[in-house]
Image (cartoon, helix red, strand yellow):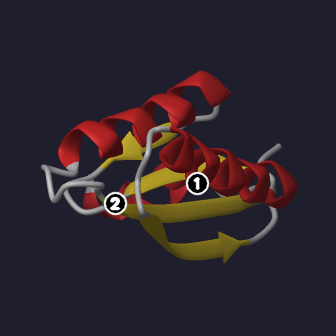
Amino acid sequence: MADTLMSIQIIPKTPNGEDVIPYVDQAIAVIQESGLPYVVNPLDTTIEGDMPELLALIDKMNRKMMAEGVVSVISQVKFYHAPAASMSELVKKYR
């Protein structure tokens, strides 16, 4: 069972100042490929999993950005760590 929620915002510096959205879409594709539960929000994406797999996912997303030719990437990350952490449980009173 998952014990961590991670919200991440990937901010790539593009090679020629082009739009970052296609790059962000590729970072989200890495999340989709992970098979972990996730929710895309307007300014970040929240993923549910275990801390080690989430940390590895950050590395994989950053490596994907570099492989796509970005100059640099900022990953803004927040963690919520608790036994049986879940997105649905954390926000259920608002839904």
Residue matched to label 2: 44
Relative height, residue 61 to residue 33 (above, below): below
As shown in the figure, which amino acid type bears the numbered disc 2? Asp
Q: Position of residue 85 (x, y in %)?
A: 68, 59
Residue matched to label 1: 62
Q: Position of residue 93 (x, y in %)?
A: 34, 62
State which mark lies toward you, 1 or 2: 1
Task: Tell me: 95 left or right of 47.
Answer: left
- Badge 2 crowding class, 10 Å Cα cut-off, few under 14, some 14 to 19, many 20 or more, is some
- Badge 1 crowding class, 10 Å Cα cut-off, few under 14, some 14 to 19, many 20 or more, is many
Counting residues from the N terminus, which is met first, the one under dot 1 or under dot 2? 2
Task: Tell me: 56 left or right of 91.
Answer: right
Q: Position of residue 71 (x, y in %)?
A: 42, 62
Element under label 2?
A: loop
Q: Residue at x 64, y 56 (%)?
A: 58
* Foreground of the two, 1 or 73: 73
Q: Are marks 1 and 2 in contact (CB under 8 Å)?
A: no
Element under label 1?
A: helix
Q: Position of residue 8 (x, y in %)?
A: 47, 63
Task: Tell me: 17 left or right of 31.
Answer: left
Relative height, residue 21 to residue 71 (above, below): above
Give the tally of numbered discs. 2
Q: Residue at x 36, y 61 (%)?
A: 12
**Distance between mark 1 and mark 2 Cα atoms:** 15 Å
Q: Residue at x 63, y 48 (%)?
A: 63
* Foreground of the two, 33 or 74: 74
Q: Residue at x 76, y 71 (%)?
A: 82
